[in-house]
Amino acid sequence: MMHRRLPAMSNAGKLVAFPVSVPCVLGMMPGTVFAASEAKQNNDTLIIDELSLYTTPPSRLRYEEPAAGHVEQGVATLRKAAEPYTLQCQQTGATTMEKVQEVYKTVEPTLNSSVQLAKDSYDLLNNPPPKLYPSLGAVGFSGILGLYLAKGYRVRRLVFPTALMALSASVFYPQHAASLAMKTKDQVYTMGSQGRVHAEDLWKKMSSVLGTSEKKK
């Protein structure tokens, strides 16, 4: 049997032999058959997400707060109405705290000294020195003797017992008496200087008032 070859095509197809018994029309028509390997090579895989039909559109949703009810509106109104009073209360509380802190800072040294004095007295009574009770007896007797010598006068009742008690205490505790005398002297000098300054200021004010009154006359 004779076979006829088809001319080669430009699209890389393989030649196929047809028998002579095929009619001339079919024999004249060119035919192209692609191999299975080329079909497998041209089969590109596609991802579904890459298709435009499967893309997720951008979200256009917006959150809207629900409308306030009657209760919420009433609470908001009360809050606005009470806001000035709350601010005033806060300011008053802050001012009160500042004043309390100032008073505490002023009183703190006195409190500390009182606490220290109480601790020292407690320690002294727990561990008394050998001359404590005789000295206390002598000081107490001096006070009673001063009251007896005062004989009804108010000034003497204040001066005599105090002087005799201080004298008795200085005999038993000379060092403490000397330090106390120095402190008393310093305090008296300070009080005297302050009194002199106040007297000078008062005298200047009185003289200025008298001078202005004379000028008016």
Image (spheres, grey):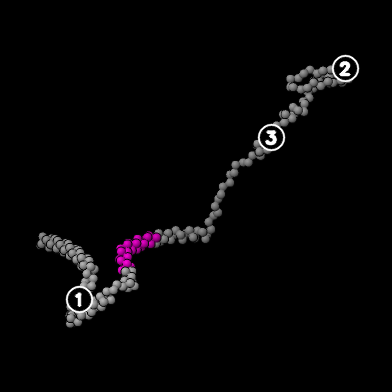
Q: Quadrant of residue 94?
A: bottom left
Q: Which residue position is annotated with label 3?
A: 46
Tell me the element at label 3: loop
Tell me the element at label 2: loop
Lower position in the chain sequence, tag 3 or tag 2: 2
Quadrant of the drawing holding the C terminus: bottom left
Amino acid type shown at disc 1: Leu
Lower position in the chain sequence, tag 1 or tag 3: 3
Q: Within 10 Å of the Cα at label 1, are there few (<14), some (14-19), or many (20+) other Cα atoms?
A: many
Residue at the front extreme of this rendering: 130
Amino acid type shown at disc 2: Met
Q: Quadrant of residue 171?
A: bottom left
- Give 183 or 176, whichever is nearer the viewer: 176
Lower position in the chain sequence, tag 2 or tag 1: 2
Image coords of residue 150 (percent x, y): 18, 80
Amino acid type shown at disc 3: Leu
Which mark identifies residue 164?
Answer: 1
Tag 3 and tag 2, C-beta contact below 8 Å: no
Tell me the element at label 1: helix
Q: Which residue position is annotated with label 2?
A: 2
Q: Within 10 Å of the Cα at label 3, are there few (<14), some (14-19), or many (20+) other Cα atoms?
A: few
Image coords of residue 139 (percent x, y): 23, 76
Does residue 195 appear anywhere in the picture?
Answer: no
Image coords of residue 176 (percent x, y): 24, 68
Does residue 200 appear anywhere in the picture?
Answer: yes
Q: Main secondary structure of the magenta part?
A: helix
Question: Which residue does the image show at 54% across and 52% down from the upper left?
Answer: 65
Q: Is residue 17 magenta?
A: no
Q: Which residues are magenta?
A: 90-117
Question: Which residue does the image show at 21% across and 74% down from the upper left?
Answer: 168
